[in-house]
Image (spheres, helix red, strand yellow):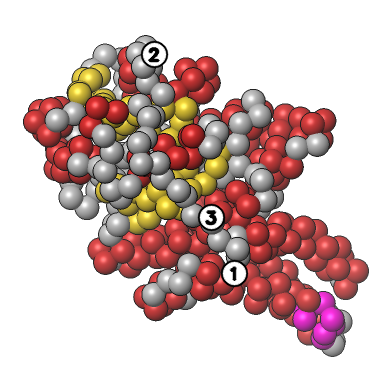
Amino acid sequence: MTILSFVFFLFAMIPFGYLYLQAIASVRGAADVLVRSQPTTRFVITLPAHDEEAVIGATVQRLRNLDYPANLFTVHIVADHCADGTAVAAREAGAIVHERNEGPRTGKGAALTWLFQRVLADDTCDAVIIFDADTRVDAQFLRIMDARLAQGDPVIQGQHIISNPDAGWFPALTWAMFLVDNRFQNLGRDSLGWSAKHMGDSICFRADILRRAGWGAGLTEDYQLRQRLLLDGIRIRYEPAAIGRGEAALTWAQARAQRARWLRGTHDASQQFARSLWQEGLKRKDSALLDGALQAYFPSFSTLTMLTMLFLLVQIIINVFVENGISWPMVTAWGVIAFALFIYPLIGLALEKAPLKAYIVMLSGPLFVVWRTWLAVSSRFGKKDVVWVRTAHGGSQ
C-alpha cells in the first residue's frame, strides 16, 4: 500500500506544482500602464442582452460616460429574443440597438456572433470590447485598453470583479474566489508568458482577430475561442487595472445551471483541443500551448483537493485497520499537500490585500469544493443534457 500511495503522491505533485508555479509567478504584481493623453483607438463596445430591461439603461449610461473621446467609441446592444423593454431602454440611454428575433435563442455566443457580423463590417473599427449587460466599468477602462493595444497586445482580458458580495453568502464566496482566480490564473499565467483566461466579459480584441477567428459557439464559446487563439499563436494578455464589475448568482440554485454549463462546455472543448495543443506545443516549443493542454488534462483545484483528502484518508484507514501501524512518511506527505491546498486561496487573498470578509467566506470554501466536484462529475458524465441558461441578475428577473 505504501508503494502504491507513493506512486499516486508523485502523480499528485505534478498538478500541485503547476498550481503553485502560477501562484509564485503572480507574486511580483502587474506593471503600471501609462495611458496616452491623446488616444487613437476606435472602439466598438458590444453587449449581449436578453430581457435586461432592469439594468441595461444604467449600464449604457455608465459606458457613455467613460473617460474617453466620445467620437472614438460606440455602444452596440444585441437585444436577443427579448420579451421586455430591453431594446427601448438601451436606445433611450444612447446605445445602437440590434434586435435579433429570428432563429432559436441558443445563448450568448450565437447572439454575439450575429452582432459581430454587423458591427465588424465597418472597417473603421480598430478594436471590440465585450461586456455583460450588468457590467459596471471603471472610467479609465478604454484608455487602458488603448494603451495596451498601442503596445502591440492583440487580446487583453480586464479584471472581472464581483459587484454584489453583500447580496448573500454565495455571491460573497464567488467574489473572494474571483480575487484569487484573477491573481493566480490570470496574472500568474501572464507573468509566465502564457495566455490568460478568456472570461467572456471585460475583454478587448483587436478587430482583425475577431474578423478572422469569429466568436464561436457551444456552451462555453469563450473557453473554446481561447484554445483556437492559442493554436493561431495568439495569447490573451491580462490587465488588472482595466476593471469591470459584474453580478454573481445569488443562490446555489441559480449558480448550479451556470456552473454545469461551464463545466460541460470546458470538458467538451478540452476533448476537442487538448491533443492538438499538446502536439503543437511540443512541435513549436511553446509553453503557452502546453499550458492550454495541461489545463485540460489536469484536475481542477477542487478535484485535486478532493482527491488529496481521499488519499490521505485511505492511507490512514489502511495503515490502522490493515497494516496495524501508521506509515508516517506517507501520511505526512499527503498531509503537507492537503495543508498547502488549504492555504492556497488564502495566499491569493493576502497578495490581493483582501479585506477580512474575504478570508471569512473563504473558510467555507471546502463546502464549495465538494459541491463543485459533484457538479463536475454529474454535468460532464451524466446523461442529462446541459443547455445554455441565462443567469438572473440581482436587479432583474
Crowding around mark 1 (Cα neighbors within 10 Å: few <14, some 14 to 19, many 20+) is: some
Residue type beneath disc 2: Asp
Magenta part mainly helix, strand or loop?
helix
User: Residue at the location (66% across, 29% down)?
Assistant: 233
Q: Which residue is mark 3?
A: 31
Identify the disc placed on residue 123.
2
- The residue to which callout 1 is attached is 344
Looking at the image, which residue is at 48% across and 40% down? 148
Q: Is residue 231 magenta?
A: no
Q: Position of residue 356 (x, y in %)?
A: 39, 78
Instruction: Please tell me which of labels 3 and 1 falls first in the chain.
Output: 3
- Estimate the x, y position of residue 62 in percent, counting from the top left: 20, 43
Q: CA distance from mark 2 to mark 3?
A: 32 Å
Which residue range is magenta in the image?
Answer: 326-332
Identify whether 17 is placed above or below 34: below
Q: Which mark is residue 360?
A: none
Kind of residue at disc 1: Tyr
